[in-house]
Amino acid sequence: MKIAFYTLGCKLNYAETSTLHRVAVEQGHEVVSFSSAADVYVINTCTVTGAADKKCRNIIRKAIKQQVGSKVIVTGCYAELNSTEIAEIEGVSLIIGNSEKSKFVDYLKSINNVEEKVFDESKSSHEFFAAYSIGDRTRSFLKVQDGCNYFCSYCTIPYARGRSRNAPVYDLVKEAELIASKGIHEIVLTGINIGDFGHSTSETFFDLVKAMDNVSGIDRFRISSIEPDLLSNEIIEFVALSKRFMPHFHIPLQSGSDKILGLMKRKYDTKLFTEKIKVINKILPEICIGIDVIVGFPGETETEFIETYELLKSLDIAHFHVFSYSERDNTLSYKMDNKVSDINKDKRSRILHELSDIKKEKFYNKFLGREMKVLFESRSKNGYMEGFTENYIKVETLVKEELYNKVSNVKITGFNKDKMVMIGEIL
């Protein structure tokens, strides 16, 4: 059969889709682009915002119209939480929960004889679906953990992904070694709440980090988003001494107001967060720190927004991602009063985006004139190729195809403000 895949959402979803892709090929199926005629369309969905839900529905309808008589399989977090809604869309053949992804081969074999549309045992399953991405020759996202036990008041992911669980460290090391054998130079450890690693194996995330540091063939490891209360000093100190774990952390803040953090049911306050950033910068003075922040949470007045702005302004960080609060059914925040208007959300988002650009430019320009190591990606645009330094500064230079997927010594010569990238000269 000809099978086409489409992924929405996070890097974890991309890792899982990449694994389903490999399984399909191993079973003798031909994988084609999503815009091509296919026998089966597989859509791996996201439900983190209302806009994500809408995009999922649009992609599902696009697949149904694309090829008469084709089968459409919907999976992922939106499918997990909205299976009844999706089942009502005429033309959807099968809806499978996140934990059902491990049975993808069986579902493919029976796709022409499906009697029930919805298959989902995720809510009672403790199974871990192992996954990693290989689509990019430079970098692989390795899924090390799934699920979340935190239940923040705005988030549906614990309901869509279940409780925190993981594969044993030994198995994940074997997967990293397999990725290395395919010529990949960088692995990003990813999951839903990776710092909470170990619930199903009585291990810790630090155990995993130490084990990965000994995997030969991988030049760079990065840690994806990790909660500030779970980023221990021993992990920070280990990264500082490691030659493989890069000086780069991404840490969600979500709000710079203790009042809003409390309403969000976050497990830290601004004092802990601020002290954590100070510790990181003391141990790793050239590290890139990225942050997530949400604007427009219910109850966020101008006072709380200014508190967030002032905290972000004061922190020694490189940049931050700004998200507008999106109401999700079946969350505590959905029932909260004092909603913030879309106009105020948009205004606050613009203000923080501008601050983030100022922060990034300041951080990048600290390295003007420096020689740095850049891993160039095998993609180019308008005669330029891009790559990242060890501390996650994006660098562009004129294309030299022989340097694709290689670590090169580069002198940083300038800053392209339009693209928000540094300009590099190959040494």
Image: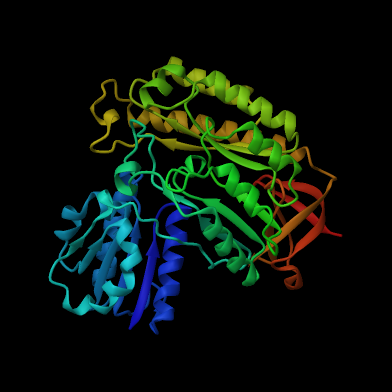
Quadrant of the snapshot with the C terminus = bottom right
Q: Residue at (26%, 55%) from the top-left corner?
A: 79
Q: Where the N terminus falls, by quadrant?
A: bottom left
In the foreground, 286 or 91: 286
Residue 274 visible, this orientation:
yes
Residue ranking furthest to the front: 202
Quick check: 182 left or right of 327? right
Q: How many badges with numbers are in the image?
A: 0
- Residues 365 and 20: in front is 20
Regarding residue 381, the answer to whether it shows in the image is no
Q: Residue 52 appears at what percent x and percent y?
A: 34, 49
Where, by quadrant of the figure, is residue 383 drawn? bottom right
- How far from the left and from the top, in percent, is residue 2? 35, 81
Color theme of the render: rainbow
* Image position of 61 (left or right of 52): left
The residue depicted at 50 percent of the width and 62 percent of the height is 132
Which residue lies at the image location 16% right of the left edge and 60% below the top edge? Answer: 87
Q: Quadrant of residue 45?
A: bottom left
In the rendered image, the vertical position of residue 420 relative to residue 350, given as above or below: below
Residue visible at 28% across and 57% down?
A: 97
Is residue 188 depicted above or below 313 in this figure?
below
Q: Is residue 233 above or below residue 307?
A: below
**In front of the other: 213 or 271:** 213
Residue 186: give x, y in percent of width and height: 64, 59
Residue 377, quarter of picture = bottom right
User: Does residue 185 appear to the left or right of 117 in the view shown?
Assistant: right
| Residue 117 pos. (x, y %) | 17, 65
